[in-house]
Image (tube, helix red, strand yellow):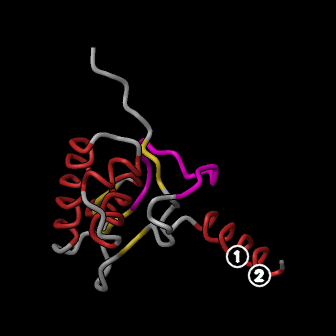
């Protein structure tokens, strides 16, 4: 019996969840990327995390990050052929803002909290 899948921690949902080629696309030519796949792409390629750092942030093993990242990259490669990309689903939980730091600094809850704390320090 396989181990149950762990929910992966995700900072926030993508602002845009569908991307369509300029020529339009049919429903049958749609690639679905999960939210946790999107998060690994964001952390590794945009935030320059290593796979190990990404695993610590998402609360999963580095080898799991590698598998998720490889899957996401293959899906992105299909988009180049003119397929529509939709980001939805997956095994994830959103950052609840309870941690002292998000790791990437991208969590809107932590940015807001940091701004409030900085203002409070300046008032004293």
Find numbered disc 2 in the image and state the secondary structure of the residue it sits on.
helix
The residue range painted magenta reads 87-101
* Residues marked 2 and 1 touching at CB (< 8 Å): yes
- Distance of mark 2 from mark 1, alpha carbons? 6 Å
Q: Which labelled disc corresponds to residue 122? A: 2
Quarter of the figure with the N terminus? top left
Q: What type of secondary structure mainly makes up the magenta span?
A: loop
User: In which quadrant of the rendered view does residue 78 lie?
Assistant: bottom left
Q: Which residue is mark 1?
A: 118
The answer to whether residue 96 is magenta is: yes
The single residue placed furthest to the right in the displayed view is 124
User: x, y percentage for residue 68?
Assistant: 26, 49
User: x, y percentage for residue 61?
Assistant: 29, 40
**Nearer to me, 53 or 106:** 53
37 left or right, relative to 118 = left
User: x, y percentage for residue 97?
Assistant: 63, 54
Find numbered disc 1 in the image and state the secondary structure of the residue it sits on.
helix
The residue located at (75%, 75%) in the rendering is 121
Quarter of the figure with the C terminus? bottom right
User: x, y percentage for residue 91?
Assistant: 42, 41
**Nearer to me, 27 or 70:** 70
The residue located at (45%, 67%) in the rendering is 17
User: In which quadrant of the rendered view does residue 24 lie?
Assistant: bottom left
Classify 10 Å Cα crowding around label 1: few (below 14), some (14-19), many (20 and above): few
The residue located at (35%, 66%) in the rendering is 42
Classify 10 Å Cα crowding around label 2: few (below 14), some (14-19), many (20 and above): few
**Number of marks in the rendered image:** 2
């Amino acid at each position: 019996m396989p181990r149950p899948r762990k929910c992966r921690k995700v900072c926030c949902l993508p602002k845009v969840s569908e991307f369509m080629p300029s020529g339009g696309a049919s429903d049958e030519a749609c690639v679905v990327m999960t939210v946790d796949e999107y998060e690994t792409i964001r952390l590794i390629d945009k935030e320059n995390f290593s796979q190990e750092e990404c695993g610590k942030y998402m609360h999963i093993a580095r080898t799991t990050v590698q598998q998720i990242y490889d899957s996401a990259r293959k899906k992105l490669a299909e988009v180049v052929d003119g397929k529509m990309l939709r980001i939805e689903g997956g095994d994830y939980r959103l950052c609840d803002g309870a941690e002292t730091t998000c790791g990437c600094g991208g969590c809107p809850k932590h940015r807001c909290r940091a701004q409030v704390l900085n203002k409070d320090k300046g008032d004293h």
